[in-house]
C-alpha cells in the first residue's frame, strides 16, 4: 500500500496512458466501461502525460496503428510521443469531468520541459484540490532527451520545482535506461514514490529485430510481459539499495502471479498494456488481489505493517470508555478470531492499545496518536485507522 502525505492510500493504479484521463480509448469509454468489463473506479488513475502546451506527437486517432502495435503475447510497442491536449485543456475540461464529476482518484502525470515550466505547471495544479498527487514523467522513451550525465540534474531540478509549487504529493516516473537509482537517491525526502518503469526502448528488448513501426520512421518503446524482467531488476535494485522511497512498480504485469510477485517488494503497482491487450484482466487481477492476495502476503509475513484492511465502524452506545477493534492483522500474524481484542482507551494525549490474546494482555503504546476531548467519533476512528493500518474487520467505538 502506498500511503501519501495527504492521507490518500492506494495499491493498484493504471499506468499513465492506459486509461487516458480516466475513461480510455473510445471503445473503452463507450463499450467496455458501460459493460462493466473495465471498472476504472477500482484503480487510482494516473493520467496520460500532459505537457504545458498541446502536443501533436505521432498519434492520429484515425490510424493509431502507425504508432501503436500489438506484438502478440500481451506485448505492445508504441511511439505515441506524448500526443496530448495540454495542461490548459485538462484544467478546463478534464478535471471537472473526470475528477470532480466522476470522482475518480487521480494522479496527474506531467512532463515539463524545463524548470520554469515545472514551476508553472505545479502552480496550476495547486488549484486542482481534488487530485491525489502529481507524477513527473522524466522518462519518456519516445522523446529526444538530454544526455545521460545531464539527466540527473535535469530531473532533480524539474521535480523539485514541481514539488515546491504544487502542494500535492509528488512522485517521479523513470525508465530502465535512466539513472533511476541516482535520481531517486537525490530526490529522497522530496518525492513520495518512484514509478518504475516506463516502456523499454525497442532495441534493448529486441536487439536483432526491426520494429514494426520502422516503416513510419519510428522504433518505439515496448510494454508487456517482455519487459517484466527489466521492471523486476529496477524494483530489486531500488529496494535493496535502501533508498527510502517507496516503489510503484509497473511494466509487464499481466498475470496474477506477476502482480503477487511485485508486491513482495513494491508498495503499489501499475497496470498498463493489459487494458489494451486483455481488457478483462486488470479488474480480474485487482479483485483477486484484494480478496486473497493481501491476506496471503500478510500470512507470509510480507509487507508486515503495510497491509490496510477494510475497517468498518459501528459506533455503539456509551459503555466503559474504550474503543474496540475486532478482526485485525498484526505484524503479519493472523490472530484467531476468539483470541483477539484491542481496546484503545481514549483520553486526552497518547493512546495505549491493549491487545488481549489467549487471556494474556499486551500493551502497545502509540505515542503518535493524539486525541483531544473535542474530537468526534468519526475523527477518532480515522486517526486510529491511519495509525493502525493493519487492522481489518470491525471497529467499534464504545465511548468517546
Ligand atoms: C499507448 C501507450 C501510451 C502510453 N503513454 C504514456 C504516457 O503518456 N506517459 C507515461 O509516463 N507512460 C506512458 N506509457 C507507458 C505506460 O505507462 C507503462 O509505463 C508501460 O506501458 C509499461 O507498463 P505495462 O507493461 O504495464 O504496459 C504508455 C504506454 C502505451 C502502451
Image: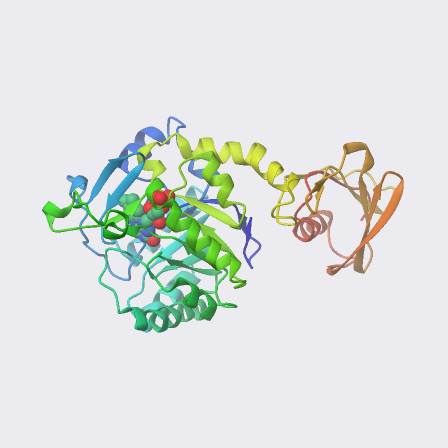
Please give the name of the residue rendered at 23% of the width and 59% of the height, measured from the top-left corner: 143
Instruction: Name the foreground residue: 325 vs 295.
Output: 295
- Asked if residue 30 lies left or right of residue 67, the reply is right
Residue 48 visible (yes or no): no
Residue depicted at 54% across the width and 63% down the height: 244
Q: Which x, y percent locates residue 142?
A: 23, 55
Q: Please determine whether, in this image, residue 28 is positioned above or below residue 360.
A: above
Question: Is residue 146 shown above or below 387?
Answer: below
Residue 59: tell me if it is visible: yes
Residue lying at the far front of the rendered structure = 208
Q: Position of residue 221 (x, y in %)?
A: 26, 50
Q: Position of residue 199 (x, y in %)?
A: 31, 50
What's the image's color scheme? Answer: rainbow
User: Viewed as shown, does residue 399 lie left or right of 56?
Assistant: right
In-image side of 292 versus 112 (left or right): right
Count up the numbered dots.
Answer: 0
Q: Position of residue 393 (x, y in %)?
A: 69, 37
Residue drawn at the location 34% of the way across and 29% of the way down: 32
**Residue that extends furthest to the top in the rendered view of this protein:** 35
Q: Residue at x 81, y 60 (%)?
A: 348
Question: Looking at this view, is 23 or 329 the one in front?
Answer: 329
Amino acid at each position: 500500500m502506498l500511503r501519501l502525505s495527504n492521507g490518500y492510500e492506494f495499491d493498484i493504479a493504471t499506468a499513465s496512458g492506459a486509461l487516458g484521463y480516466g475513461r480510455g480509448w473510445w471503445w473503452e469509454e463507450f463499450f467496455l466501461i458501460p459493460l462493466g468489463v473495465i471498472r476504472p473506479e477500482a484503480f487510482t488513475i494516473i493520467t496520460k502525460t500532459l505537457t504545458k502546451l498541446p502536443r501533436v506527437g505521432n498519434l492520429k486517432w484515425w490510424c493509431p496503428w502507425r504508432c501503436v502495435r500489438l506484438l502478440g503475447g500481451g506485448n505492445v510497442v508504441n511511439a505515441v510521443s506524448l500526443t496530448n491536449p495540454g495542461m490548459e485543456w485538462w484544467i478546463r475540461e478534464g478535471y471537472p469531468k473526470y475528477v470532480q464529476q466522476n470522482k475518480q482518484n487521480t494522479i496527474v502525470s506531467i512532463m515539463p520541459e524545463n524548470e520554469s515550466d515545472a514551476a508553472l505547471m505545479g502552480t496550476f495544479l495547486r488549484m486542482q484540490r481534488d487530485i491525489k498527487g502529481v507524477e513527473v514523467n522524466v522518462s519518456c522513451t519516445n522523446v529526444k532527451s538530454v544526455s545521460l550525465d545531464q539527466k540527473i540534474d535535469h530531473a532533480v531540478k524539474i521535480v523539485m520545482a514541481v514539488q515546491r509549487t504544487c502542494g500535492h504529493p509528488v512522485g517521479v516516473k523513470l525508465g530502465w535506461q535512466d539513472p533511476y537509482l541516482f535520481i531517486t537517491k537525490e530526490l529522497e525526502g522530496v518525492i513520495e514514490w518512484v514509478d518504475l518503469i516506463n516502456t523499454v526502448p525497442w532495441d534493448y528488448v529486441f536487439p536483432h529485430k526491426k520494429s514494426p513501426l520502422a516503416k513510419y520512421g519510428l522504433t518505439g518503446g515496448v510494454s508487456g510481459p517482455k519487459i517484466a524482467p527489466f521492471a523486476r531488476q529496477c524494483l530489486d535494485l531500488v529496494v535493496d539499495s535502501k533508498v527510502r522511497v517507496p516503489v510503484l512498480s509497473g511494466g509487464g504485469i499481466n498475470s496474477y502471479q506477476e502482480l503477487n510477485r511485485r508486491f513482495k517488494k513494491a508498495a503499489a503497482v501499475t497496470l498498463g498494456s493489459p487494458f489494451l491487450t486483455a481488457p478483462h484482466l486488470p479488474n480480474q487481477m485487482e479483485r483477486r488481489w484484494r480478496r486473497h492476495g493481501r491476506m496471503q502476503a500478510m500470512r507470509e509475513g510480507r509487507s508486515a505493517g503495510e497491509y490496510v484492511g477494510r475497517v468498518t465502524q459501528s459506533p455503539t452506545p456509551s459503555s466503559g470508555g474504550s474503543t474496540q477493534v475486532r478482526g485485525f492483522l498484526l505484524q503479519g500474524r493472523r490472530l484467531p478470531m476468539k483470541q483477539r481484542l484491542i481496546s484503545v482507551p481514549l483520553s486526552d494525549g497518547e493512546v495505549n492499545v491493549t491487545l488481549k490474546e489467549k487471556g494474556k494482555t499486551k500493551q502497545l503504546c502509540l505515542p503518535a496518536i493524539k486525541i483531544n476531548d473535542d474530537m468526534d467519533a468519526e475523527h477518532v476512528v480515522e486517526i486510529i485507522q491511519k495509525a493502525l493500518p493493519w487492522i481489518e474487520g470491525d471497529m467499534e467505538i464504545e465511548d468517546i
